[in-house]
Image (cartoon, rainbow, N blue to C red):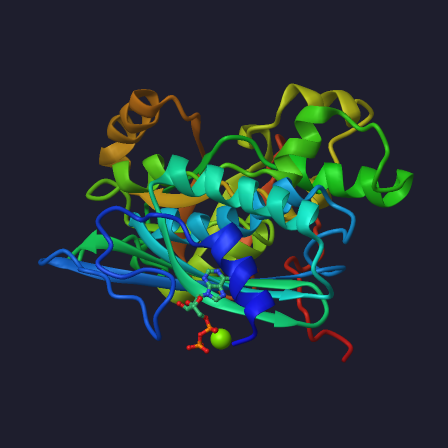
C-alpha cells in the first residue's frame, strides 16, 4: 500500500473502535459476534451521477452512503454492529474527504455502528459499504413472510425525496429548494429503532428505496400474495401537499424512490401493537392497505382512489440495465 493512501486512511477512517478486537490496519478486521444472534449482512454501492449529484455536499454524501445501508438493516429488524467502506476517488481532495468523513462518522456514532475496514482506490467517484448487524435467531423481518389478511403499513411520509429530486433536476442542483425536502433526499434517517421494535409484531418488512410500488411488490412476489392500497391513506407531508396543490402526482409519490421508510405487513390482531411501537419511538406509522391472496389478472400492488378505482401507474423501480 502506498504511503499517501495509508496516511489518508489513517487520518480519516482509522478511529478507536471500542469493543472491536481489531479494526482498521491489518489484513482483516476481527469482530466478536454475539452468541445466539444471526448476522445480517448487506452491501450497497453509490455511484456519482447515478445515485447522487457529483456536486452534492460531501458531508451529506457520507451520511447518505451509510444511511441507505443502515436502512437495509432496519428492514430486517437488525441491530447495527460493524461496517466496511470501499472508496473509489478520482483524486485526493482533503477538504472534501474531511467533510465526507465527518458526515459518515456522525451517523455511525448515532447508530452505534463501527467502521472496521475497507479499501481505497482511484477511479470515478463511487462508494461501496457493507454493513453487518445482529438479529436474534429466526426473528428477522423477511420479505417472504407476509400472510393474506395482513395489514400493510408505512412509516413516515412518502414522496418527499422524489419530489426534491424532481425539483433539483428541473432547477439545477444548487437551486434553493425547500430545505426539509432537500434533507429527505440527501440525509435520509434510517428507521432502525422501528425495525427492531417490529420484531415479533410484523411479519414481513422492506425499506422503500425504489418507491413503495416496486418495494412492496418484492414482498408480494416473495410471499406469493398481492397488495391493495388506498390512496387516501398514503401519508404525505404538508410540504409535498403544498407543492402538489393542483393534484397529487401519485407516480412520483409511489414510484419515485429514495424514501428510506419501512413498509411492513402485520396481522390485524397486531394493529394496536404496531401503533404503540411507533408511539414509543415517536415515528409515525400508517396503515395503508392489506395483503390478499393472488388474483390473476391483477398486478402485484393495486392502489385504489376514494371511489374504489385503480390508479393507473407505470411499472415502478429503477432498473440500472434497462435499455443497455
Ligand atoms: P490490503 O492491501 O491488505 O487489502 P489495504 O492497504 O487495502 O490492505 O488497507 C489497509 C487497512 O486499511 C485495512 O485494514 C483496510 O481494511 C483499511 N482500509 C482501507 N481503506 C479503507 C477505508 N476507505 N475505510 C476504512 N478502512 C480502510
Ligand atoms: Mg486494499
Q: Is residue 297 above or below residue 62?
A: below
Q: Residue at x 45, y 48 (%)?
A: 71
Return the residue found at the far front.
3
Left or right, 299 with respect to 207, comes to: right
Q: Position of residue 293 (x, y in %)?
A: 38, 57
Q: Residue at x 76, y 59 (%)?
A: 49
Q: Position of residue 301 (x, y in %)?
A: 54, 53
Left or right, 60 with respect to 31, comes to: right
Left or right, 309 with respect to 149, comes to: right
Q: Is residue 68 above or below residue 181?
A: below
Location of the C terminus by quadrant is: bottom right
Q: Position of residue 156 (x, y in %)?
A: 50, 30
Whether residue 295 is visible to the viewer of this picture, yes or no, is no
Q: Position of residue 290 (x, y in %)?
A: 41, 43
Left or right, 229 with respect to 182, comes to: left
Q: Is residue 98 above or below residue 278?
A: below
Q: 138 or 38: nearer the eye?
A: 38
Q: 259 or 104: nearer the eye?
A: 104
Whether residue 323 is visible to the viewer of this picture, yes or no, is yes
Question: Toward which corner of the image does residue 184 lie, by quadrant?
Answer: top right
Amino acid at each position: 500500500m502506498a504511503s499517501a493512501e495509508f496516511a489518508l486512511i489513517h487520518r480519516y477512517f482509522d478511529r478507536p473502535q471500542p469493543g472491536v478486537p481489531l479494526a482498521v490496519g491489518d489484513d482483516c478486521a476481527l469482530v466478536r459476534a454475539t452468541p445466539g444472534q444471526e448476522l445480517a449482512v448487506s452491501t450497497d454501492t453509490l455511484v456519482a451521477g447515478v445515485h447522487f449529484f457529483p456536486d452534492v455536499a460531501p458531508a451529506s454524501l457520507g451520511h447518505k452512503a451509510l444511511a441507505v445501508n443502515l436502512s437495509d438493516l432496519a428492514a430486517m429488524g437488525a441491530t447495527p454492529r460493524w461496517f466496511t467502506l470501499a472508496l473509489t476517488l478520482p483524486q485526493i481532495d482533503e477538504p472534501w474527504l474531511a467533510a465526507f468523513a465527518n458526515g459518515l462518522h456522525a451517523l455511525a456514532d448515532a447508530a452505534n455502528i463501527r467502521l472496521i475496514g475497507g479499501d481505497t482506490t482511484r477511479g470515478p467517484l463511487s462508494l461501496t459499504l457493507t454493513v453487518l448487524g445482529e438479529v436474534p435467531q429466526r426473528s428477522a423481518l423477511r420479505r417472504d413472510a407476509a400472510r393474506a389478511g395482513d395489514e400493510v403499513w408505512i412509516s413516515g411520509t412518502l414522496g418527499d425525496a422524489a419530489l426534491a429530486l424532481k425539483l433539483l433536476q428541473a432547477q439545477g442542483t444548487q437551486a434553493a429548494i425547500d430545505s426539509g425536502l432537500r434533507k429527505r433526499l440527501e440525509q435520509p434517517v434510517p428507521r432502525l429503532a422501528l425495525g427492531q421494535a417490529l420484531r415479533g409484531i410484523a411479519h414481513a418488512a422492506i425499506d422503500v428505496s425504489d418507491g413503495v410500488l416496486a418495494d412492496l411488490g418484492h414482498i408480494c412476489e416473495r410471499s406469493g400474495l398481492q397488495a391493495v392500497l388506498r390512496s387516501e391513506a398514503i401519508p404525505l407531508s404538508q410540504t409535498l401537499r403544498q407543492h402538489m396543490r393542483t393534484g397529487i402526482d401519485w407516480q412520483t409519490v409511489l414510484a419515485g424512490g429514495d424514501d428510506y421508510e419501512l413498509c411492513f405487513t402485520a396481522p390485524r390482531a397486531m394493529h394496536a401493537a404496531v401503533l404503540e411501537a411507533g408511539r414509543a419511538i415517536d415515528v409515525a406509522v400508517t396503515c395503508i392497505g392489506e395483503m390478499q391472496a393472488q388474483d390473476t389478472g391483477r398486478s402485484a400492488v393495486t392502489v385504489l382512489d376514494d371511489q374504489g378505482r385503480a390508479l393507473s401507474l407505470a411499472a415502478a423501480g429503477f432498473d440500472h440495465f434497462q435499455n443497455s
